[in-house]
Image (cartoon, helix red, strand yellow):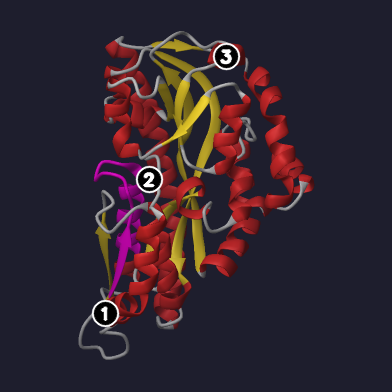
């Protein structure tokens, strides 16, 4: 699910309310800690539906935590952005008002952890194998360390949030030149906005929830998304041409509050760490299956024209974005390392 960004006013209100939020939620969440009278309750949140692979990941997390602690620790899942946007959820995890959330590198981590932008660079991953190797290796560890320092969160695992492709209603896009002048809705992460500008589009960040109506009304000509959102958000009704640019393999961190983790018993901490690993395996598998199923259904429907592209042509246009953001993400050596995976 593509992230929706919080306004500055919303974030300000959250920070002002932080002492009250933390005091109330932490008291409710950890009221049973050490007393034996009541279970510890960990609240987790994501912005997908109950049918989204995020839900599958959190259901596995819940299952493992509760089994490993014999019910002494229980998990409550809040889906569909019930508790706020990705950015707001990240802040609540930082403050200890939430135990965990699914924080995409673009929406949940990028605004707070500049190092996360390294894995948001367009066309930096060739396919799924280097994507997973990079996240499970040094690049992922580097972003996790930065998240611990700047967001006070632990990354229990890196989830797969889909492969983004570019689509529009106006014309087939086979080369970067075909994108010239198109108004394309993009995620608000700065490197992606810059990349689509470099490709010649009018890159237009907007709320994901506003996208369908914006397409209907011609405010934008197209957008970028994975196949799952293309199907389940019914964007196939308001677009025509899907170019398989595969310009972003979107990572999402399963982030856990260090504040709350420190208040758990050693046994509960081990259960959380194990559950994080198991949840990551389950979520990745669910997302891979959902992606293939969604693509098959879209082909069967016949509403869309899928267009193969030469990705190297697009990558050549965005190399300047790599150079422009090198310092921000830790240097060109960091970028070269990721490319090398």
> Mark 2 packing: few (<14 Cα in 10 Å), some, or many (20+)?
many
Furthest-left residue in this view: 37
**SS assignment at label 3:** loop
Does 12 sit above or below residue 36?
above
Q: Which residue is nearer to you in this view: 199 or 230?
A: 199
Cα separation between marks 3 and 2: 28 Å
Q: Look at 52% across and 17% down and name the residue there.
A: 181
Cα separation between marks 2 and 1: 26 Å
Residue bounds of the magenta highlight: 41-64
The residue indicated by pointer 1 is 24
**SS assignment at label 1:** helix
* Residue 233 covered by magenta stretch: no
Q: Earlier in the sequence, mark 2 or mark 1?
A: 2
Q: Look at 28% across and 30% down and name the residue there.
A: 233
The residue indicated by pointer 2 is 4
**SS assignment at label 2:** loop
Of tags 3 and 1, the one toward the viewer is 1
Q: Look at 33% across and 20% down and name the residue there.
A: 218
Q: Which residue is nearer to you in this view: 37 or 262?
A: 262
The residue indicated by pointer 3 is 309
- Where residue 174 sits in the image (x, y, percent)? 55, 10
Q: Earlier in the sequence, mark 3 or mark 2?
A: 2
Taking 326 as reference, is 243 left or right?
A: left
> Mark 1 packing: few (<14 Cα in 10 Å), some, or many (20+)?
few
Q: Look at 41% across and 57% down and name the residue there.
A: 8
- Where residue 41 sits in the image (x, y, percent)? 27, 73
Q: Which residue is nearer to you in this view: 271 or 211?
A: 211
Taking 176 as reference, is 105 left or right?
A: left
Q: Earlier in the sequence, mark 3 or mark 1?
A: 1
* Residue 63 covered by magenta stretch: yes
* Residue 340 visible (yes or no): no
């Amino acid at each position: 699910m593509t992230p929706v960004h919080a306004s500055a006013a919303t974030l300000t209100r959250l920070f002002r309310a932080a002492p009250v939020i933390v005091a109330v939620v932490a008291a409710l969440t950890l009221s049973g800690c050490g007393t034996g009278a009541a279970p510890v309750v960990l609240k987790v949140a994501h912005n997908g539906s109950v049918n989204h692979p995020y839900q599958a990941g959190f259901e596995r997390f819940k299952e493992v935590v509760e089994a490993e602690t014999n019910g002494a620790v229980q998990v409550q899942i809040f889906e569909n952005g019930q508790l706020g946007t990705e950015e707001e959820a990240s802040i609540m995890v930082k403050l200890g008002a939430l135990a965990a959330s699914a924080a995409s590198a673009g929406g949940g981590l990028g605004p707070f952890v500049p190092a996360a932008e390294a894995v948001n660079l367009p066309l930096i991953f060739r396919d799924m194998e280097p994507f997973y190797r990079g996240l499970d290796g040094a690049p992922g560890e580097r972003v996790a360390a930065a998240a611990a320092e700047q967001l006070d969160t632990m990354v229990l695992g890196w989830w797969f949030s889909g492969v983004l492709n570019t689509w529009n209603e106006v014309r087939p896009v086979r080369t970067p030149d075909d994108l010239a002048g198109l108004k394309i809705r993009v995620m608000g992460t700065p490197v992606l906005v810059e990349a689509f500008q470099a490709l010649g589009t009018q890159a237009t960040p907007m709320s994901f929830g506003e996208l369908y109506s914006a397409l209907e009304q011609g405010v934008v000509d197209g957008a970028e998304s994975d196949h799952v959102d293309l199907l389940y958000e019914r964007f196939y009704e308001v677009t025509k041409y899907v170019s398989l640019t595969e310009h972003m393999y979107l990572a999402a961190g399963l982030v856990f509050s260090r504040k709350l983790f420190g208040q758990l018993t050693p046994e509960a901490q081990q259960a959380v760490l194990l559950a994080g690993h198991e949840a990551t395996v389950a979520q990745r598998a669910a997302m891979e299956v959902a992606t293939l199923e969604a693509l098959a259904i879209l082909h069967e429907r016949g509403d869309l024209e899928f267009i193969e592209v030469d990705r190297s042509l697009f990558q050549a246009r965005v190399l300047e974005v790599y150079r422009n953001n090198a310092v921000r993400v830790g240097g060109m050596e960091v970028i070269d390392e990721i490319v090398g995976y």
